[in-house]
Amino acid sequence: MRKDIRYKITTFLFVLPSLFVFVNVVIIPFLMGIIYSFTDWDGFAFKGSSFVGLKNYISAFTDQKFITSFWLTAKYTICMVALVNIVGLGLALLVTSKIKTKTLLRGVYFLPNLIGGLILGFIWKFVFTKFFVQLGEVTKTSKFFFNWLDNPTAAFWALVTVGVWQMAGYVMVIYIAAIESIPTDIMEAADIDGANSVTKLRKIILPLISQAFTISLFITCSNSFKQYDTNLSLTNGGPFGSTELITMNIFQTAFGYNKYVIAQAKAIIFFFVIMVITMLQVYLTKKKEVEMQ
Amino acid sequence: MKARANISRLLIILGWLFAVLTLFPIYIMITNSFKGRAEIFTDTIGLPQSIDFTYYANAIQKMDFFRAFLNSLTITVASIFFIIIFSSMAAWALVRNKSKTSSFIFFLLVSTMLIPFQAVMIPLMQYMSGWSIKSINFSMIDTFYGLIFMYIGFGTSLSVFLYHGFIKGVPVSLEEAAMIDGCNRFQTFWRIVFPTLKPISVTVAILNVIWMWNDYLLPSLVLRSPKLRTIPLSTFYFFGEFTIQWNLAMAGLVLTIIPVIIFYLLSQRYIIKGVMEGAVK
């Protein structure tokens, strides 16, 4: 009996440091955030703030800029999910085929992923504002190569380009892991049966890496939705606020306009969207697993 | 057979084409960090006429680069040290002690991985600024230990999750033998269990390094004194100030990337393995 209590105490001591920090950094602020979003807190002492019901949420939903940046983020996410996965899978197929120097190539493709989004954005800012302009002048293709960051539509695609450049290598790694786990005898059997590369890809590789698809789609989806750093360094929301993604809108509402509670309401909405996407993904994965059995 | 050789040649060309495309912005950045103002204006694409490190010397000074590097290093190393110790301990206790409380704590940790940083940042700053004792100069805001504390908090979920998954596959028999030999639980953990966790510890460390080293938003909110700036922070202020001087700005960016490249070259194998494990879970 005494041993049992001692066991419980030591277990508690083992979990305590993590739990203490975690509760204070994540759980308490998160709960505070939910409460704050229903009050008229002014950013200073919480004492004296009063409950205002859904007022902040109504303000958020009637904020045209928020709605715009929400849809822009959705559009950005869709483009990113499609392009990152196409490029990432393409690269993975390339470096798992029997070519020389594939290890080196893998290393190169993955590299941008290690450089932070903020710094990547700055590098590309130079590429778009200086290199593109000059390339357009020299090759007389200034219809396509101009300063993308000066034009709302092009600036959006500039964000997507940099995003794909950054994330494709990451997704590639996931696909490589899946492709390499396909048993070699299956591929050999296909070779003996005379299957060509396209058939092998369609009938063997793609169905067998379906789990990697779900993972990669989900990761690109949630990462694109949460994109902030590249947005800040590359376009900073411009030109004319046309590329302000949702995270930047939340940040601006809070620290630019000091409307903390409205920003907090927006952040809670943002959290719900991410949660719904994740639930959907988990549901779809489960469903697929059942179908496979 | 000949067709196959052609396809393979085509793939190699394609592969290198992509590699060049990937590295091209980095090439542009490096070459232009050596060019004078006029040269950038007339020729962004070519190699620089002369290799001149003036802009580097200038950027090092203006960014306070070595201080920023040391700051980033201190924060990253300290946070990861504590994350590894705390998370492995917690995960081990949660796996070995099967109870409703254990599964609840684990569930809590995992489910909060969904919470985006934006949803907690405003109250977190408010809450943490309340943790201050003026008389002994204790404050969570604008101090390294404050930021490290928050990094441990944000890093805990994924790290405990990864350790949890790994420890489930570690047999208990060794631990039981150690207990019979008279080790208490702390000794058992540190002497027997922790060494066996090395592979997953490397993964946890790498995933956290990539995240923390590049993180901008959290330190930008917590750290206010210019002296405490990390590399992303000092890059941000530096770039904002010198965008017109592109060569200087590019030299600054090259400096920030050098440590990342060195880290990558030294531990590429572990990095790719770590990212695979982190993603699949």
Image (cartoon, rainbow, N blue to C red):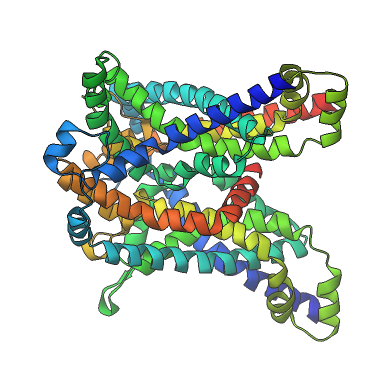
Q: State the residue at coordinates (72%, 68%).
A: B196
The answer to whether one can see residue B130 in this image is no
In this picture, residue A260 sits left or right of residue A285:
left
Q: Quadrant of residue B213?
A: bottom left
Q: State the residue at coordinates (26%, 74%).
A: B134
Residue B70 x, y percent position in the rendering: 34, 67
Q: Quadrant of residue B63?
A: bottom left
Nearer to me, B32 or B172: B32
Nearer to me, B68 or A144: A144
In this picture, residue B217 sits left or right of residue B160:
left
Q: Quadrant of residue B225?
A: bottom left
- Name the quadrant of the N terminus of chain A: bottom right
Relative height, residue B202 to residue A30 (above, below): below
The answer to whether one can see residue A77 in this image is yes
| Direction left: furthest residue | B38
Relative height, residue A65 to residue A10 (above, below): above
Nearer to me, B269 or B77: B269
| Direction bottom: furthest residue | B182
In this picture, residue B55 sits left or right of residue B113:
left
Relative height, residue B274 to residue A8 (above, below): above
Residue B82 x, y percent position in the rendering: 52, 68
Q: State the residue at coordinates (56%, 44%).
A: A104
